[in-house]
Amino acid sequence: MNLFPRNEHTVDRALRVVVGLVALSLVFVGPQTLWGLVGIVPLATGLLGSCPIYTLLGTGTCPVKAKS
């Protein structure tokens, strides 16, 4: 069993990183709210290339099939 199976497409990963960085910026600029820390989740999943929800649902956006 792979702990972090790759299940995100490159575009999906890039969007997650951008959304995560934008959300994290809310901690430092703009409304300066701690809700921006929620951006850690999409940033981490984007950098790792693995989404735990995709793993639980047995789906993903990555076109590469896992070796069996």
Image (tube, rainbow, N blue to C red):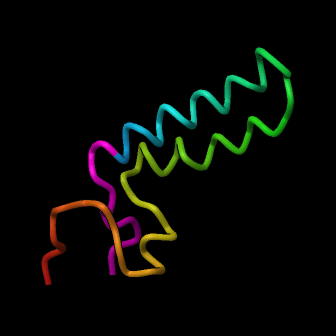
Q: What residue is drawn where x is 15% and y is 64%? A: 64
The image quarter in which residue 13 lies: top left
Name the one closer to the observer, 2 or 54: 54
The image quarter in which residue 36 lies: top right
Q: In the displayed structure, would residue 57 be above or below residue 21? A: below
Residue stretch in magenta? 1-11
Name the one closer to the observer, 26 or 6: 26
Q: In the displayed structure, would residue 66 be above or below residue 38? A: below
Q: What residue is drawn where x is 55% and y is 47%? A: 42
Is 20 left or right of 17, judged from the image as shown? right
Instruction: Find residue 8 and report its horizontal and vertical position in percent.
Output: 33, 56
Q: What residue is drawn where x is 45% and y is 80%? A: 57
Residue 3 shown in magenta? yes
Is 34 left or right of 21, judged from the image as shown? right
Is 48 left or right of 18, judged from the image as shown? left
Main SS, magenta region, reads loop
Instruction: Find residue 32 and report its horizontal and vertical position in percent.
Output: 85, 22
Residue 4 shown in magenta? yes
Instruction: Find residue 63 and report its horizontal and vertical position in percent.
Output: 18, 62
Q: What residue is drawn where x is 35% and y is 75%? A: 59
State the quadrant of the C terminus. Answer: bottom left
